[in-house]
Image (cartoon, grey):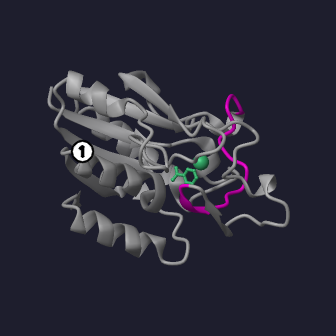
Amino acid sequence: MTHALIVIDVQKDFCPGGTLAVTGGDEIVPGINALMADFDTVLLTQDWHPADHSSFASQHRGQDPFGMIDMPYGPQVLWPDHCIQGSDGAAFHIGLDTDRADLIIRKGHNRTVDSYSAFFENDHETPTGLDGYLRNREISNLTLVGLATDFCVSFSALDAARLGFEVTVRMDLCRAIDLDGSLQTAIKRMGAAGVEIV
Ligand code: VGL
Ligand code: ZN
């Protein structure tokens, strides 16, 4: 039991019809369900924001979604309201096989700091606890799939590599937001960090 599958943020708001829809976000669901059969351990992450989360453009006077602001922890993209705790949009895609999950990790609940990565908030310091969970279970290899390639998937992959895990990202089972070249940047960073991109 050394290899885990981590399914990142396959939630309604990131799929067509959602408030932060990723093009083709729903297309990856059948393939992810099928891939689960190859893993003993399956983890899901869920973006899980309070309604007044500071990553929402709605919380900043005069700011529009997809603009940038400077936060104490660095630059932050402003998003449309999405994945509000307990809302329908925060639910997993209806087709995702959530029964297979050993652990569901929720992130982004700290109002003042966004959290793209499954391991750390965007201050790159505050842990979610996932590292400890994986180490306790002697898991050393991770395969990542889900949404979005250039934000939560790549941030998770980079942190995982930095923490010493062997990381593979299945690009065919990810979809990207691709804001101002963010997908190319993410692919470059992951490659440089030793993440296997297949
Ligand atoms: C995500 C933007 C904001 C993601 C989450 O899951 O990639 N992107 N919150
Ligand atoms: Zn979010």
Front-most of 87 and 70? 70
Q: Is mark 1 on a helix, strand or loop?
A: loop
Residue 61 horizontal side relative to residue 138, left or right: right
Task: Indicate whether 52 appears above or below 184.
Answer: above
Vertical position of residue 178 compared to residue 29: above or below: below
Please provide percent x and percent y for residue 173.
37, 53
What is the three-letter code of the residue carrying label 1?
Leu
Residue found at the very far bottom of the displayed protein:
180
- In the displayed image of the protein, which residue is found farthest to the right? 61
Tag 1 residue: 163
The picture places residue 47, in percent across and down from the top left corner, at: 56, 40
Horizontal relation, residue 130 to residue 84: left or right: left
Tell me the quadrant of the picture where the N terminus can be found. Answer: top left
Q: Residue at x 62, y 43 (%)?
A: 12
Q: Around disc 1, counting alpha carbons within 10 Å, would you say few (fewer than 14), some (14 to 19), or many (20 or more)? A: few
Q: Which residue is drawn at 25% across and 51% down?
A: 162
Q: Is residue 100 left or right of 181 when viewed as pictured? A: left
Q: Which residue is drawn at 65% across and 55% down?
A: 20
Asked if the magenta segment contains residue 83, the reply would be yes
The quarter of the image holding the C terminus is bottom left
* Image: magenta residue range: 73-87
The total number of labels drawn is: 1
Along the horizontal axis of the image, is 151 left or right of 92?
Answer: left
Q: Residue at x 45, y 39 (%)?
A: 126
Q: Where is residue 108 in the image (x, y as percent from the top left)?
A: 57, 40
Magenta portion: prevailing SS class: loop
Image position of 143 with respect to 65: above or below: above
Q: In which quarter of the image is residue 136?
A: top left
Magenta-span inclusion, residue 125: no
Measuring from the top left, give residue 120's x and y in whole percent. Answer: 42, 42
Q: Report whether the residue tagged 1 is closer than 8 Å to ligand 1.
A: no
